[in-house]
Image (cartoon, rainbow, N blue to C red):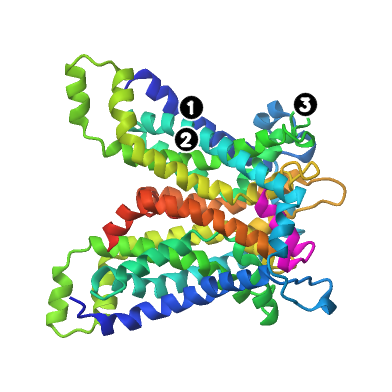
Amino acid sequence: MHRDQRAALPFVLPALTAIALVAIAPMLWTLWESVHLHDLRMPWLGQPFIGLDNYAEAFGDPRFLDAALHTAAFVVGSVALELLLGLVFALAMSLAWRGRALIRVVVLMSWAVPTVVAALVWRFLFEGAEFAWFAHPVAAWVPIVLADAWKMTPFVALLLLAGLESIDPALYDAARIDGAGPWRQFREITLPLLRPALLVAVLFRALDAFRVFDVIYVMTGGGPGTATEPISLYTFNTLLQHLRFGYGSALSVLIFLTTFVLALLYIRLAGRTLLEERA
Amino acid sequence: MSGWAFRAAAALVVVTALPLVWMLLASVTPESRLFEPAALWRGPFVLDHYRALFEERNFWVPIRNSLVVAGTTTLFAVTLGGGCAYALARMHFRGRYLILAFVLAVSMFPQISLVAPLYLLLREAGLINTYPGLILPYLTFAMPLTIWLLVGYFRQLPRDVEDAAAMDGAGRLRTLVEIVAPLAWPGIATTAILTFVYCWNEFLFALSFTLGPERHTVPVAIALFRGQYQVPWGQILAAAAVATLPVVLLVVLFQRRISEGLTAGAVKG
């Protein structure tokens, strides 16, 4: 059974070593930093162990709590919008027989456009407007969410389209014979059978939206003030602007843990089939 | 096709294409008329912004940086990842499932969680603001991506050719290089293209680990564009068009493969 135990090693080892060096070791280092005081502006303080003080600071830090709230709102808003639009477009794509190639090119194009470019173009579109979108703490979210939806909806549509195409067309034929209209067919066949694909798309996008950085950095820089600052941007500022590496690492660990929980859910739902295809 | 589906599909195409068309038109419109939507479509069109971009701003430098970093990362990731993926797809050994799960888990690491240690590490090694200082961090997402995609492609290959090679006494490495790689070429190319696109578009690491225009990649250079008195929108949009061109070309040329790779992979957005 395990006849290749030795033969596999030289193939697997280089890649795994590389991953261990560039991802695992740094992650452990982040953990270490997060329980130490480490301020690059004050090197004379050294790096004393301070237990969970950085974490305690985070939970009492209004800017961090605000940023967490902003992130949660962004995740809910953008994922809901992308899912709804993605579903409509996936259905349209599955029904369309003309212009499929064109649709696919256009859909992939917005996926392939660098996020920075998408953010800049949408900022430009909104800068031209009468209303000063970016000066308003709540309204500033509108262009941000739209830019994100423009960029990511096509991807959601592709994921859902793959789900739609796996539904047996005979089911629809049978429903039609039973006299079920399009709406009933959608509610009783499409939606339940699409549930796994929908869940995968939701979690996948939630994971991604939770880490949002590029769009907001480029469109508002977190402003006005810190009204649109998500946790990744606050963490980035804590690290590379304020040079507080200990505290910033604690924030990084909190982001990591949240992602980890979401990722576990995702793997439970999608990963097992993905893994089994490959194992 | 039913009427609403056609209209929805048409709307999708228009809504998706419109901002890009707008970007292209604005990039050839004089600065003074940029914010008059009606004027955008009329012309006359000028290439001033592109000229300024390459002659005054030296936009060749970020393009070169992006090509070097994205190209090298892709090369490393596909070579190292290819070997690993082949073993995972074709050999029987303990821990295979565990390694796959590990690769999948690492692909979900939030980049921001790695910024602090990678910054300290690169600073210690004197690699801040260098090419290796970007290529190494890029491997954190490129390696899991290539392994994951390539395992999928290798598994789809027919087995008998390899078995024949094994009968001939060809070693594993020779089988991979001489038999499997040529057969899996389309999959390898798709993997390379996807990896390249992710690297070309990457922003957070490039922003964190470069200091000056001489090492900025294209996305960082565009995001940090500043004029002396005001935002130079014309040049920004021209630069945005230049940044978009290579990835859009790849997408148009390899659309079918890329959409398959994306939905099969579903590990990165």
Element carrying mark 1: helix
On the question of residue A75 being in view, the answer is: yes
The residue carrying pointer 1 sits among few (fewer than 14), some (14 to 19) or many (20 or more) residues within 10 Å by Cα, namely: few
- Going by the numbered disc 2, the residue's amino acid type is Leu
Element carrying mark 3: loop
Disc 2 versus disc 3: nearer the observer: 2
The residue labelled by disc 1 is B11
Looking at the image, do the residues carrying marks 3 and 1 touch, with CB atoms under 8 Å apart?
no
Which chain does the numbered disc 1 sit on?
B
On the question of residue B216 being in view, the answer is: no
Query: Spatial distance from mark 2 to mark 3, Cα to Cα?
Result: 30 Å
Disc 1 versus disc 2: nearer the observer: 2
- Going by the numbered disc 3, the residue's amino acid type is Glu
The verdict on a common chain for dots 3 and 1 is no
As drawn, is B165 to the left or to the right of B231?
left
Q: Is residue A40 above or below residue A224?
A: below
In this view of the protein, which residue sits in the foreground, A246 or B105?
A246
As drawn, is B188 to the left or to the right of A146?
left
Please name the residue shown 47% across and 64% down the image: B106
Q: Position of residue A93 (x, y in %)?
A: 37, 32
In this view of the protein, which residue sits in the foreground, B72 or B31?
B72
Query: Spatial distance from mark 3 to mark 1, Cα to Cα?
Result: 25 Å
Q: Is residue B94 above or below residue B28?
A: below
Task: Please tell me whether the stretch drawn in magenta is mainly helix, strand or loop.
Answer: helix
The residue labelled by disc 3 is A130
